[in-house]
Amino acid sequence: MAFSLQESKLPMLPFSVLIIISILGRSLHASDPPLTLDHYAPTCPSVFEIVKKEMECEVRSDPRNAALIVRLHFHDCFVQGCDGSVLLDDTITLQGEKKASASINSLGGFQIIDRIKSKIDLELAESNIPTADESLLSIITKFLYQGLSVTDLVALSGAHTIGIGTLCKFSDEDLQGLRNNFG
């Protein structure tokens, strides 16, 4: 019985999604807590949708991409466990597994992981930028999460008033009320 290309690649997608999540989020330090499937739930609840969508695009563009990711995961897990270390680039003091002799001519798919990780990073950054309609507590929490203090919040928020701005959040009535109250 012959299978169509579409039928043969779709079962790989859920598996590929789990593989990418585990590769992207694996801890590189044994002392860190183990990764769980809900690791990104608080900071990026749409991570599964992002990975699934991107992997679907990658597999549609070239069905061999699913196999590249599976092989990447295999090589990662075979060398000291599934820790994402196969994704490490070289540094001054360490040769990363990505360009090691065992990987250099046999592994691909790094660019797929990099593109997906970029999409996730963008989602994380966008969801972490405070907006004008958030509560003060929410904004303080986002600053603290970035390692910034309340003093940093005041300074950076105040910096938004330097120069010429556009009042897009105020209605004419709001502005008239400000004029009446503050001259």
Image: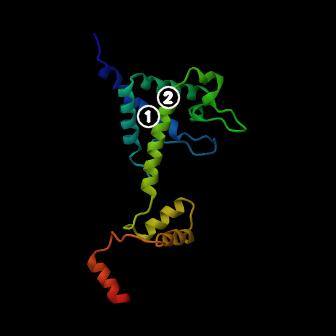
Give the residue number, with chain letter if any, for mark 2: 109
Residue at 48% of width from left, 41% of height from top? Answer: 117
Q: Mark 1 belongs to which amino acid?
A: Leu
Q: Mark 2 belongs to which amino acid?
A: Gly
Label pair 2/1, CB-CB below 8 angstroms: no
Give the residue number, with chain letter if any, for mark 1: 18
Residue at 35% of width from left, 88% of height from top? Answer: 181
Question: Is 72 on the left or on the right of 62, as rendered?
Answer: right
Residue 27 x %, y %: 58, 41
Label at residue 132:
none
In the picture, which quadrant includes the C terminus? bottom left
**Would you place residue 22 above or below residue 7 in this image?**
below
- The outermost residue toward the right is 93
Colour scheme of this structure image?
Answer: rainbow
Q: Secondary structure at mark 1?
A: helix
Residue 107 x %, y %: 55, 24
**Would you place residue 155 above or below residue 82 in this image?**
below
Residue 104 x %, y %: 60, 24
- The outermost residue toward the front is 164
Most foreground residue, 115 or 28: 115
The crowd level at tag 1 (other Cα within 10 Å; few <14, some 14-19, many 20+) is some
Residue 177 picture quarter: bottom left
**Would you place residue 133 above or below residue 94 in this image?**
below
- Kindly tell me whether residue 45 is visible in this rendering: yes
